[in-house]
């Protein structure tokens, strides 16, 4: 009985982790009550800064996976693509040529347990960048963790 309970827990944890590690669709999934455009700008600038430390901007071509265009409501996606372009990345939307060297780009920005906690995950090719942020009572957003970069 004890072995079955442990096996069930391990299986549940593995499924939960697998779900967190993949991003089926791109988007900004934050509650309006916790949203502030300054937060999006700060998180984007921070993410682009980290990505440029890991991937060479002038040599890396990115393609937004799982979407032909960006939604007008997806302010993080638009900000991320623009920030990457401003730092020298070739970042496109739509379907690239089959012989393309573009790396697939997926992302998600979401709230955690409250509107003041945010989690960003950006997948580029074999890399995954993730970080937690927290908005304080004064309305400032700050990193709550270090960047996690997995390959």
Image (cartoon, rainbow, N blue to C red):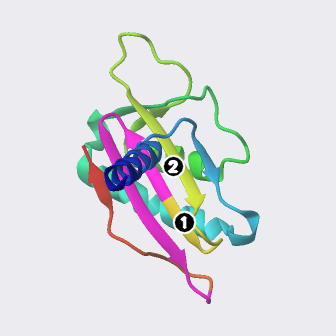
Q: Position of residue 71 (x, y in %)?
A: 70, 39
Magenta stretch, overall SS: strand
Q: Residue at x 45, y 40 (%)?
A: 22
Query: Is residue 131 a member of the stretch shown in magenta?
Result: yes
In-front residue for pair 20/137? 20
- Residue 125 falls in image quadrant: top left
> Relative to residue 93, is residue 137 depicted above or below?
below
- Determine whether the residue tagged by mark 1 lies in a helix, strand or loop: strand
Q: Quadrant of the C terminus?
A: top left
Residue 129 lies in the magenta-colored region: yes
Between 7 and 11, the residue placed more toward the observer is: 7
Image point (75%, 64%), residue name: 32
| First of labels 2, 1 by sequence position | 2
- As drawn, the label of residue 118 is 1
Rendering coords of residue 82 (x, y %):
52, 46
Boundaries of the magenta span? 120-138
Mark 2: secondary structure: helix
Q: Position of residue 41 (x, y in %)?
A: 55, 63
Q: Is residue 110 above or below residue 103?
A: below
Mark 2 or mark 1, which is nearer to you? 1
> Residue 80 shows which numbered tag?
2
Residue at 29% from the left image edge and 36% from the top image edge: 126
Q: Quadrant of residue 31?
A: bottom right
Q: Is residue 135 left or right of residue 146?
A: right
Disc 2 packing (10 Å; few <14; some 14–19; many ≥20): many
Where in the figure is residue 131, as x and y percent of width and height?
41, 62
In the depicted structure, whether residue 92 falls above or below residue 148: above
């Amino acid at each position: 009985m004890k072995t079955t309970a442990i096996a069930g827990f391990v299986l549940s944890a593995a499924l939960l982790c697998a779900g967190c590690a993949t991003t089926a669709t791109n988007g900004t999934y934050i509650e309006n009550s916790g949203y502030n455009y300054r937060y999006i700008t700060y998180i984007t600038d921070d993410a682009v800064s980290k990505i440029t430390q890991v991937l060479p901007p002038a040599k890396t071509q990115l393609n937004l996976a799982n979407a032909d265009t960006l939604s007008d409501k997806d302010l993080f996606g638009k900000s991320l693509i623009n920030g990457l372009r401003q730092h020298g990345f070739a970042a496109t939307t739509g379907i690239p040529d089959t012989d393309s060297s573009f790396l697939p780009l997926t992302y998600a920005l979401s709230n955690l347990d409250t509107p003041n906690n945010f989690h960003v995950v950006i997948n580029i090719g074999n890399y995954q960048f993730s970080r937690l942020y927290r908005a304080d009572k004064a309305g400032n957003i700050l990193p709550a963790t270090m960047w996690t970069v997995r390959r």
